[in-house]
Amino acid sequence: MRAIIQRVTQASVTVGEEQVSSIGRGICVLLGISVEDTQKDIDYMVRKILNLRIFADDSGKHWSKSVMDKQYEVLCVSQFTLQCVLKGNKPDYHMAMPSENAEPFYQDFLERMRKAYKPELIKDGKFGAYMQVNIQNDGPVTIQLEPPASTADPKHLAKLEKQQQRKEKTRTKVPSESRERSTPSTKDDPSASSGAEGDVSSEREP
């Protein structure tokens, strides 16, 4: 899970011609959910986001108060592109949690945010929609946040790593490999990989 947290004077989300959400002073949270995220990650991120001291106190002392201390608003926007892995210059999103699993996971994140703070002060975009996000960054102040790696299940991470290694091996199989081999029969092997398979980059819209 990755979050980009921006201190804002105002922020809003528009889908098409309709403004679906807006806040005044507070924070805007862009959240990318990965295939390896767990419920422990949600707990950690909610706690850190709401207690992050990025506001000044009444005397003007910086980095003293959290969004909860100031009773400001929070706008959360799901953004799978934060899980991008570059393959050359092409974004690849195989580490992003599939939308059918990510949506209930994201809703659980929102629910925990509301329980930990004030429900009426937690706003949301529209999951899966093509959104226009207007952010007036105050400062600018932008914080990147991730949960500790130890919160993920080691067995699950090992499985994901093996899957990725298999995909990488598939991508590296090109016709020139068969021509470089010394065995003549291999040169004419029709089963040699074209290297076309294994492209798992997502075509989804943010």
Image: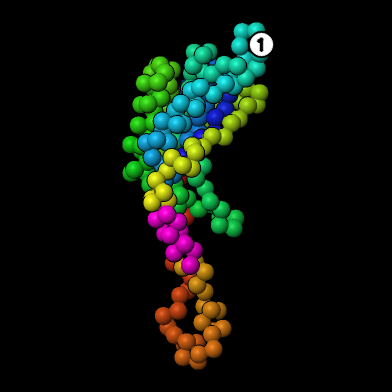
Magenta segment, prevailing SS (helix, strand or loop) = helix
Which residue is pictured at 65% across the width and 26% down the height?
140
Query: Looking at the rendering, which quadrant does residue 16 occupy?
Result: top left
Query: Looking at the rendering, which quadrant does residue 191 occupy?
Result: bottom left
Q: What kind of element bears circle 1?
A: loop
On whether residue 28 falls in the magenta region, the answer is no
Colour approach in the figure: rainbow
Could you say where residue 132 lies in the image, as x and y percent from the top left? 50, 33
Could you say where residue 160 lies in the image, as x and y percent from the top left? 42, 54
Q: Which residues are magenta?
A: 158-169
Q: Nearer the viewer, residue 8 or 161?
A: 161
Could you say where residue 197 lies in the image, as x and y percent from the top left? 44, 67
Give the side of residue 11 with respect to residue 37, left or right. Answer: right
On whether residue 168 falls in the magenta region, the answer is yes
Could you say where residue 69 lies in the image, as x and y percent from the top left? 51, 14
Which residue is pictured at 59% across the width and 22% down the height?
54
Residue 121 against residue 173 in the figure, above or below: above
Which residue is pictured at 43% across the width and 40% down the height?
151
Looking at the rendered structure, the kind of residue marked 1 is: Gly
Work out which residue is located at the far bottom of the displayed protein and give it.
Answer: 184
- Count residues near mark 1 (Cα–Cα under 10 Å), then give few for <14, some for 14-19, many for 20+: few
Does residue 162 appear in this view? Answer: yes
